[in-house]
Amino acid sequence: MDRALKTQTRLSYPSRQKVLEAYAAGTPVKEIASSFDIYRSTVWKIVTGAGQPTRNHDLSLDVREEARGLYESGLTLAEITKKLGVGRLNARAAIISTGGAIRPRGRRRQ
């Protein structure tokens, strides 16, 4: 018999409020999900279900071009996300949208 990867966690009303407070305070969704032992999609359902506005993930053209420049100078996506304070997928999308190309995975060239 197949079993789910994670047992279902039902959050009480006070716990749901804490999820909303953490999200509003800017805590990353991945961190919130981990601390409450829930899926990231559950965090999104709680946030959108409460009518709370979601964070704007659109990056300005200046930030997107900076991300591309940093990537082309040899930094990794992880280093760029840390430096610019954006998510990995946002950094990747920024590089591609400004004409950059993503390098193959693996070791950096020396």
Image (cartoon, rainbow, N blue to C red):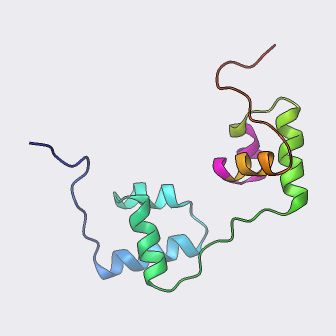
Residue 100, percent from left and from top = 83, 40
Residue at the left extreme, as displayed = 1
29 horizontally vs 14: left or right: right
The main secondary structure of the magenta stretch is helix
Q: Image height check: is 100 above or below 97?
A: above
Identify whether 94 is placed above or below 51: above
Which image quarter: residue 39?
bottom left
Quadrant in which the C terminus is drawn: top right
The answer to whether residue 86 is above or below residue 13 is above
Q: Residue at x 71, y 54 (%)?
A: 86
In this rendering, position of residue 42 left or right of residue 62: left
Residue segment shown in magenta: 79-89
Residue at image coords 74%, 65%: 58
The residue at the far bottom in this view is 51
Left or right relative to 7: residue 27: right
- Closer to us: 99 or 12: 99
Check the image and name the residue furthest to the top.
110
